[in-house]
Amino acid sequence: MSPASAATAVNTPTRFAEVKGRRIAYRELGQGVPLILCLRFRGVLDSWDPAFLDALAAHHRVITFDYSGLGQSTGKPSYVRTDMARDVIDLADALGLERFVIGGWSLGGLSAQVVMRLHPERILKALLIGTSPPGKVRFPPKPLFFEYALKPVNDLADEVVLFFHPESEKSRAAAAASHERIAARTTDLSPAIPIATVFKLLEETKAEDIFVDDNGYRDFLKTTTLPTLVISGDQEIVFPVENWFDLAPQTRSVHLMVFPQMGHGPQHEAPQLCADLIASFIKNG
């Protein structure tokens, strides 16, 4: 058994790619079709649920990373979508990946869509979890999200609100289980992003729309034949799934899967189910 296949998300080492004067921290698991996953708002390498990554790695080469200047990566930090997308391409080049599946959760889903738009020839398929379509949308994030997401530190109670469905006993239990799985990794951790840095990054990216359609992103999503899987909970408070209901019927290749009584992190609430769905989509979609 190779080291890559023996590793799990709790113990796989952090590696570093030296690219264009900065160092991108990344981890990888499994073998097969490469899948690069982009992080959520305030996320670092250790924000992913290990159960989800391990389930994905049963069929794919799963690559996670810290954006430039955040976590264990060096360089200038930025939440500008094109900067985050550049990290993906630079990391793929450093790893010798000509083509790959691009995935992203929340803010990472915006980055993934920019990668699709700017480099469609590099993308096999796309996976978007708990994120927004481009351009103006009818349903903005709920105020509750900002109340909790901008706390200096988020505890389990905050995570229940942010990523799960507080009114569901099953969802609250899933949140506690996911929290414990994430906490199982105790060494080689990526440092949390200081709240002062978070506010600075938000200030630099301030705009009227969450995903400003400044480069034909919405039209691209409508016309592309790149198979794209969107996964969302029906209790999503950050990027309401109703915005995808508006767009998906106008597209040629967007598959929309909505999980009942789940919030912003369905892949953490139902890691095996989400991974099985993704594996089937990558193989057959």
Image (spheres, rainbow, N blue to C red):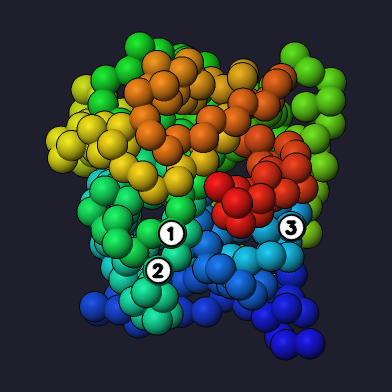
What is the distance, in whole Å, between disc 1 and disc 3 at their CAs? 20 Å
Amino acid type indicated by mark 1: Leu
Q: First in sequence: mark 1 or mark 3?
A: 3
Q: Are marks 3 and 2 in contact (CB under 8 Å)?
A: no
Taking 195 as reference, is 193 above or below it?
below
Q: x%, y% of residue 172?
A: 79, 27
Q: Are marks 2 and 1 in contact (CB under 8 Å)?
A: yes
Q: Which residue is mark 1?
A: 124
Check disc 2 and report its element: helix, strand or loop. Answer: loop
Q: x%, y% of residue 257?
A: 60, 30
Q: Residue at x 16, y 40 (%)?
A: 215
Q: Would you say 178 lies left or right of 25 here?
A: right
For label 3, count other residues whose C-alpha is less than 10 Å away and answer few (under 14), some (14-19) or many (20+): many
Q: Which residue is mark 3?
A: 55
Q: Is residue 152 visible?
A: no
Between disc 1 and disc 3, the foreground one is 1
